[in-house]
Each structure stands twice: as C-alpha cells, then as structure tokens.
Image: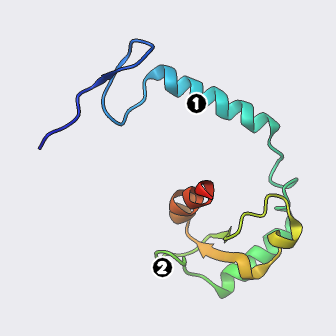
Amino acid sequence: MPFAAPSIRACGCVVAPGQKCSHAVARDKERKAAFDQTRPTARQRGYDSKWDQARKAFLAKHPDCSRCGARAIVVHHSTPHRGNKAIFWDRSKWVPACQPCHDGPLQSQEKRR
C-alpha cells in the first residue's frame, strides 16, 4: 500500500505525514495557554450548583448517550449557548452524551458551525 513521504517544515524538521514537529506542538501549547488565561471559569460561564442539580436530574431520566448508547455523563447543548442564559437553560436543546462522543464528534460539529 502506498504511503506519503515525510515532509520538511519551514523550521527544518522532517515530519511523518499526519504528525506535528516539536515547534508546532510548542506553538499550539502557547496559543491554548494564552486563550485559557482570558476564558472565564466554568462557574462564571453558568455551570454552578443549580446546573449540577439540573444536569443530574436530566441524566437520571436520559442515562444513555444519544450517539452510541453508552452511559451518558455529559449534558451537551445541541445549540451553542455562548453565554445566552435562555439557550443555556432550554432543556429541549440538551442532549445526553458520553465523554468520548461529547469531546470528539459533538464538539467538532459545534466548531464547524
């Protein structure tokens, strides 16, 4: 089966297909750290004790992931609320999800919107 040849990056690193050089990894880490400094905490974004209770009750009624059927441990907002409390508390937009589905396909879908 054919495969792609390694590539030479601008920094001079030779990298296998689908991989990142150590310089790119370091840049990504710095960029993410800078973003995290400006991002509000979970509590500031509305995930407080009231949310904890509502989440627990929702998952008790909907114990299975909507994608794969595994045990759901995350309540995913099907419409990104971006701080909008009306959307945040709209239970019709809540979807039960397991951690792998939430962190993988559901989050990447949300980023594409």
Residue at image position (80%, 53%) is: 42
Residue drawn at (82%, 48%) of the image = 41
Height in image: 25 above or below 94?
Answer: above
Residue, disc 2: 69
Residue 73, image x and y in percent? 62, 70
In the picture, the quarter occupied by the N terminus is top left
Residue annotated with mark 1:
28
To which quarter of the image does residue 18 belong?
top left
* Horizontal and vertical percent position of residue 29: 60, 30
Residue 50 lies, with reference to residue 103, above or below; the image says below
Residue at the outermost front position: 113
Q: Is residue 36 left or right of residue 13?
A: right
Q: Cα distance, mark 1 to mark 2?
A: 33 Å
The picture quadrant where one finds residue 99 is bottom right
Q: Depth check: give the residue in front, 62 or 78.
A: 78
Query: Label 1 sits on what residue type?
Result: Asp
Q: Is residue 77 left or right of residue 2?
A: right
What is the secondary structure assignment of the residue under circle 1?
Answer: helix
Image-based side of 63 in relation to 92, left or right: left
Of 19 and 57, nearer the camera is: 19
